[in-house]
Image: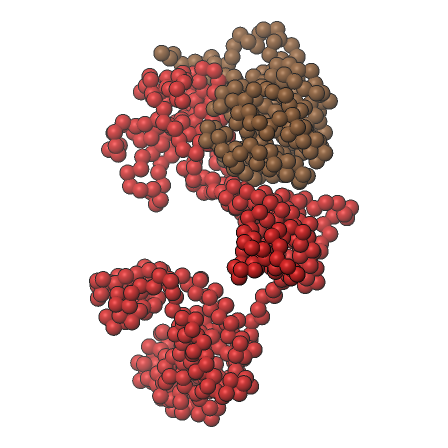
Amino acid sequence: MRVMERQGDAPPDDVPFVLAREAQHGPVVHATNRVARLAGVMAGSRVVDMRAICPDLQVVYADQAGDRLALDRLVLWARRWCPWSVRDGDDGIILDTTGSDHLLGGEAAMLVEMETQLSLLGLTSRLAVAPTWGAAWALARFGPVRAICAADQVAVKLGALPVTGLRLDAPTVLLLRRLGLKTIGALIDVPRLSLTRRFAKAALVANPLLRLDQALGTLAEPVSSVDPAPRFIAQSRLAEPIFDPTPYLPALCADLCDLLHHAGFGCRRLHLTVYRTDGDVSHLDVAMAAPSRDPVHLHSLFRDKVAQINPGFGFDLITLQADDLAQLQNIQTNLEGGSDDDLHLSQLLDRLTARFGDRAVTRPVLRASHIPERAEARLSALAAPPALMPVPANERPIRLLDHPEEIRVLYAVPEGPPAQFQWRRQVHRVARYAGPERIAPEWWKDRPGTRLRDYFKIEDQVGRRLWLYREGLHADGRGGDPRWFVHGMFV
Amino acid sequence: MGLLRMQKTPQGVPPQVGLARFTLSEAFVETAADAAALGFALARLPRRQRPLLWVQDRLSRKETGYPYIAGIGTQRPVIMVNLSRATDVLWAMEEGLRCRSLGGVIGEIWGDPAVLDFTATKRLALRAEAAGVSCWLIRRAAHPNLSAARDRWRIGALPSAPHPHDPQAPGAPRWAVELFRSRHAKPGAWVATYDRAADRVDLVAATGDGTLDAGDGTAGRRATG
C-alpha cells in the first residue's frame, strides 16, 4: 500500500510532480505522480537526470519522518479489522487476519471493505491475502488486484511473479537476473544445493533462499504486533452547561494523576478540552520540562490560562488528557528526604513557560561558531540541556546588542579603532584599546560578499568599555569604505 | 584608607554582617550602555553551579542588549526570560524566588513603572530572604524612589586598572560603587576592582588618603584629538 501524501495542497494532476529525498550523490526521486510516471520518471533515479528527461518537472522534498509517523498511526487504525498489525518497511502494513476474516464476510469481502475504508481516508491501497508475510508482500506489489492466495497455492501464485517480489536488495536482484532467474518460479525450479553453495554466507536481504523459504512458509516469520501507547484521560460530565472550568480542574488533575500513578507514568503535556453545548470544541495545552504527575503542579499550570478558553454558550463536558508520557518511578534522591532541586527547577520552568509562552523562556547555550551572534543558541527551556561547549579563549563582552549599532567616526586613525566617535548622540573618546581580533565570515553559511570583522575592546574617557568592530577592509573590493559598529559592552 | 576585601567563601556564609547576600539588592545604572552593575552583581552572587534566572523587559533588551553566555561563562547556566511589561518581570522574579535551587535572580527594569513600588520590592525582598536566593534588580533610567531593597547601590564604570603586559590596553575593570542606602551596612562609596581570574571584587574606599585618585591607571593614554 502506498501512502499518497499532501491532501490539502496537492499539485494538479496534469503537472509532472515528484517527491525527492537526499541520497549519496544528491537528491533522488522518492515518489512520482501519474503524469511524471508516464513521462518516464522512475522512482530511485536522480532528480537531475529526470529533469533532463522532463524539463517541467516539479520537485518537492518528501517528509519521510512524517510519512513513517502517519503509517504508524495507520497501523493502529487498522486494528479495527484484526488485533495484530505491524508496520512493514516504509510503505506497507501487515495485518494478521487469521480468524477475523469471517467477521467481515470472508476474505474477498474483507479486502473490498479495507479498500473502501482506506480510500475514504484519501489513500490508494494495493491489498493481498496470503498465508505468509513474504507472499503477501509479493502479491500486493506484483500480483493481481486484491489477490487471495490459499495455503496450498503459494508456490503456484508466486511462481509467475518477478524475483523482485522476494524482498531482496538491488545487487542480488541484478545478480539473479544475470543468472537468468527472472521469476520466482524459475528460482524454485533450480536445485537447492547449487543455490545454497552460492548464497551460503549472504545476509537475509541478499539471500534468495531464505527469502524464498519465508515466502513459502518453510521459515517462520511471526508478526510481532506493537502495543498502542497507553492513554490517560480524566473527564467530568456536568449536569448543566457552565462557563468556567476552574472549580473542576483540581479534581480532574487529581483523577489523572491517580491514573498515571497506578500505571507508573508521568506526562510532559496536558490537553484540556471542553465540549461546548453548541457542538464546538475548545482546547488548551500546557507543557512541562520534566515528566510529572503532581496534581498541585499540574493544576498550577492552568491557573493563568483558563481565561483563554472560549466558553461560547457554556460547556457540559471537560476532559483532561495526558500526552508525551514517560515512565516515572518514585525515587528518593537523598537520605535526609529533603527537597529535590532539579524537580523544583523544572517546575519553575513549567510555570514560567505556561504563563509567558515557549518563546519568552529560553536557555541560551554556546554553539560552535566564531561569529559572536551565532555563538549562542537559544533553546526552549523545556528541552533537555545539551552538552557543554568550551568558552571561547578570547575575552567576550557580558552584553551583546541584538543588532550592532553603527557609529559615526569623528577622528579616524590609520591603525586601531577611531580615536573619537559618536554613538547614540554622545561623543566617545577612545582612551585605551585592545585588539584587533579578526573574525572572518563563515563562507559555508554567509552569502558571498560578506565582509570580515576586526573587533576592538575599547575604553572611553569615562571608563565605559565597549566592543567595536570594523566591517571590512579598505581595499577588499566588497563595498565602499569600511563601517564601524558597536556590538557589545564589557563589565 | 579603608580596604575591604570580599572573597566568596564556598560555604555560602556571608563574609560580613553588613553584606548579607541572600536578599534583594537594587543597582542603579547611570548610563544605559554601562555593564558595570551587571559585573558587580554577578561577582557578588554565590559561586555555585546553579542556574541563574535572568528576567529582562523589552526596553532593557532593546537599549542594552542581552546577557552573552560567552562572556558570562558556562559555570553558571542562565535561564533567560524576555518579557515586555514590568508587571510580568516582577511576577517572573517572584516566581523564581520561590525556587530554592536557583543560584540567583537578576531582573532588569527600565524606568520607573508604577507597579514597581514599595510593596512590590518588599515582596521580592521577603521572598529572597525566605528562599535564601539572592536577587538583584537592575534599574536603568530610573529614580531611587521608595523601595524595600535591603541594599541600594549606584554603580558606574571607572577607567580600568593598568594592563600588566600592554600599556595601551584596558586591564582589570574598575567600578565606582556607592552604597547609598542599606539596612545592615554603613553606606559609603568605594572603588571596586574586579579580578577576573579569581572572580573576586576588591573594594577600596573612594575618599581615602588621595593617593589612589592621582593615577587612574590610564598611563598609556593615547594622544587624541
Residue found at the very far right of the displayed protein: A336
Label total for image: 0
Displayed quadrant of residue A32: bottom left
| Near-viewer residue (A460 or A354) | A354
Question: Residue B96, position in %: x, y?
Answer: 63, 38
Q: Is residue A312 visible?
A: yes
Instruction: Note whether A254 is above or below B60 in the view shown.
Output: below
* Point 25% across, 67% down: residue: A14
Query: Chain A rendered in what hue?
Result: red
Q: Which chain is brown?
A: B
Instruction: Note whether A446 is above or below B181 in the view shown.
Output: below
Quarter of the picture containing the N terminus of chain A is: bottom left
| Near-viewer residue (B7 or A264) | A264
* Point 25% across, 63% down: residue: A57
| Near-viewer residue (A217 or A304) | A304
Question: Residue A107, position in %: x, y?
Answer: 48, 87
Instruction: Note whether A39 is above or below B106 in the view shown.
Output: below
Displayed quadrant of residue B225: top left
* Point 41% across, 74% down: residue: A119
* Point 44% across, 62% down: residue: A66
Q: Seen in the image, is A240 located left or right of residue A487?
A: right
Question: Residue A252, position in %: x, y?
Answer: 67, 57
Q: Is residue A416 visible?
A: no
